[in-house]
Amino acid sequence: MTHILNADLHCHSVVSDGTLTPEALAQRAKANGVELWALTDHDEIGGQDRAIAAARQAGMPYLTGVEVSVTFVNVTVHIIGLGFDHTHPALVAGLKQTRGGREERARDMGADLARVGIPGAYEGAMKYVGNPELISRSHFARYIVEAGFCTDTNAVFRKYLAEGKPGFVPHRWASLGDAVGWITGAGGVAVVAHPGRYKFTANEEFALFTEFKTHGGQGVEVVTGAHGQADYVKYAEFCREFDLMASRGSDFHSPDESHTDLGKLPDLPGGVTPVWELLEARVH
Ligand code: AMP
Ligand code: MN
Ligand code: MN
Ligand code: MN
């Protein structure tokens, strides 16, 4: 696989908080020219068999994927796994455990939102949930827009669901070492997702990447929907500094909500090694 490849290794289906099925995503990716695809649902690999089959039908090379929620120094960090064996027992069990607290968290979110004048948010969010084990803030955001409290989901996060806002319920996710261990133990490569989104100080970010490497992490998302030009440059530099491979993925969730469509991303900057060079043997 070449350096310049329309790889899109980050997106979400109805199996987590996306609005399209794995099959519809595969068709959209193919139509948009994607040449290597991965479905990376949050904490969940239940869509992988469908994605593998749909990609095969579309004639589009595919890598297994997941986006694991991690708590690192009290901040939520996302770790992408790519090219693993999605039947590996420790990975399957670890993800199930990571999903486990979501139901109770969602009920607490519903109670908090009721206190600030949004009744019935838990029940409302459930109408949007495709997988009962994977209720997310995105589902609440869709309901809060439907109920007329905000005009779009970004506004819901700003007003209600971001850290420190009234509907935000702190949650302890997997540890960094566990998440990286589950992915690498199943034969995959671990990648720090959208590092430009975390509000880390330079010291905290250095600690994240240092610890990530210690656990066996090998990649960083350089080109992704939430990043701009300055992030591409900064994290390409991180690739050299920390000897990491570069990944590329839209983080597409929905035609109505996502700014970056599947496959519609700038190429990786020169001078980095694409993560897919490590993963040729894992392509479906
Ligand atoms: P959760 O895993 O339930 O905490 O939900 C996290 C998801 O919420 C992310 O994967 C995004 O899809 C979405 N999200 C988080 N922050 C924002 C934001 N500021 N604007 C829009 N969506 C967001
Ligand atoms: Mn999401
Ligand atoms: Mn994420
Ligand atoms: Mn994502």
Image (tube, grey):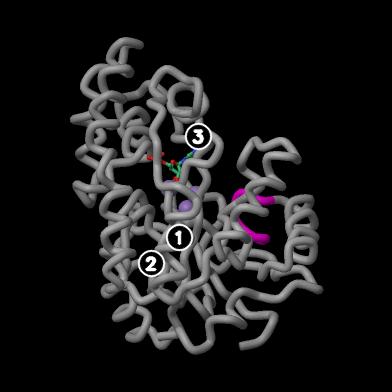
Residue 29 in sight: no
Instruction: Residue 154: give its label.
Output: 3
> Sequence-wise, which precedes: disc 3 or disc 2?
2
Nearer mark to the viewer, of 1 and 2: 1
Q: Secondary structure at mark 1?
A: loop
Q: Residue at x 27, y 68 (%)?
A: 89
What is the distance, in whole Å, between disc 3 and disc 2 at their CAs?
A: 22 Å
| Amino acid identity at mark 1 | Cys
The 10 Å Cα crowd at callout 1, few under 14, some 14 to 19, many 20 or more, is many
Residue identified by numbered label 1: 11
Is residue 222 one of those drawn in magenta? yes
Determine the residue positioned at 45% across, 84% down.
282
Name the residue tied to disc 2: 25
Q: Is residue 27 left or right of residue 53?
A: right
Answer left or right for 117 relative to 274: left
Marks 1 and 3: which is nearer the front? 1
Vertical placement of 97 versus 144: above or below? below
> Is mark 1 in CB contact (under 8 Å) with mark 3?
no
The residue under label 2 is which amino acid type? Leu
Q: Amino acid at mark 3?
A: Asn
x 53%, y 69%: residue: 8
Dot 2: within a 10 Å radius of its alpha carbon, few (fewer than 14), some, or many (20 or more) residues?
Answer: many
Confirm if mark 3 falls within 8 A of ligand 1: yes
